[in-house]
């Protein structure tokens, strides 16, 4: 499952093309500004999250992967 195109477009605009990561474990002190191209579910679908903009975080590949390994949800987008 992934976000509909309309949500992806809005998230990309909101983020201005850069990673929206705000995690404490981020090597960029939670303010990564790398170019992003992946969409992360803040709350995983399996945990009751949905495909709404509010649940979408636009992230760079590194932060996205780290987000999943950190929360133990490796592999789930
Ligand atoms: Zn990060
Ligand atoms: Zn990042």
Image: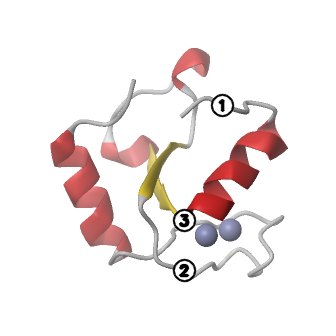
* Residue 3 in the image, given as x and y percentages of width and height: 32, 36
Asked whether the residues under the numbered discs 2 and 3 touch, taking CB atoms below 8 Å apart as contact, a structural biologist would say: yes
Which mark is drawn over residue 60? 3
* Residue 23 in the image, given as x and y percentages of width and height: 72, 63
- Any atom of ligand 2 within 8 Å of the CB at mark 3? yes
Task: Determine the secondary structure under disc 1.
Answer: loop
Q: Is residue 1 above or below residue 19?
A: above
Q: Quadrant of ligand 1?
A: bottom right
Relative placement, left or right, of 66 versus 22 is right
Dot 2 or dot 3, earlier in sequence = 2
The colour style of the image is secondary structure
- Any atom of ligand 2 within 8 Å of the CB at mark 2? yes
Give the alpha-carbon distance from disc 2 to disc 3, as whole Å: 6 Å
Relative placement, left or right, of 62 versus 51 is right
Relative placement, left or right, of 60 versus 35 is right
Q: Is residue 2 above or below residue 30?
A: above
Dot 1 or dot 2, earlier in sequence = 2
Label 1 crowd bin: few (<14), some (14–19), many (20+), radius 10 Å: few
* Residue 43 in the image, given as x and y percentages of width and height: 57, 34
Task: Determine the secondary structure under disc 2.
Answer: loop
Q: How many marks?
A: 3
User: Closest to the observer: 16 or 55?
Assistant: 16
Would you name the residue on which mark 1 appears? 75
Which residue is painted at 54% across and 80% down in the image?
A: 34
Q: Is residue 15 above or below residue 4?
A: below
Farthest residue in the left direction? 6
Dot 1 or dot 3, earlier in sequence = 3
Give the alpha-carbon distance from disc 1 to disc 3, as whole Å: 15 Å
Would you name the residue on which mark 2 appears? 34
Give the alpha-carbon distance from disc 1 to disc 2, as whole Å: 21 Å
Q: Quadrant of the N terminus?
A: top left
Task: Determine the secondary structure under disc 3.
Answer: loop
């Amino acid at each position: 499952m992934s976000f509909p195109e309309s949500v992806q477009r809005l998230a990309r605009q909101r983020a201005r093309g850069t990673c929206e990561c705000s995690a404490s474990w981020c090597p960029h002190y939670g303010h990564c500004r790398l170019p992003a191209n992946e969409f992360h579910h803040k709350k995983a679908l399996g945990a009751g999250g949905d495909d709404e903009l509010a649940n979408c975080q636009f992230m760079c590949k590194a932060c996205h992967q780290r987000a999943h390994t950190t929360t133990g949800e490796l592999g789930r987008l």
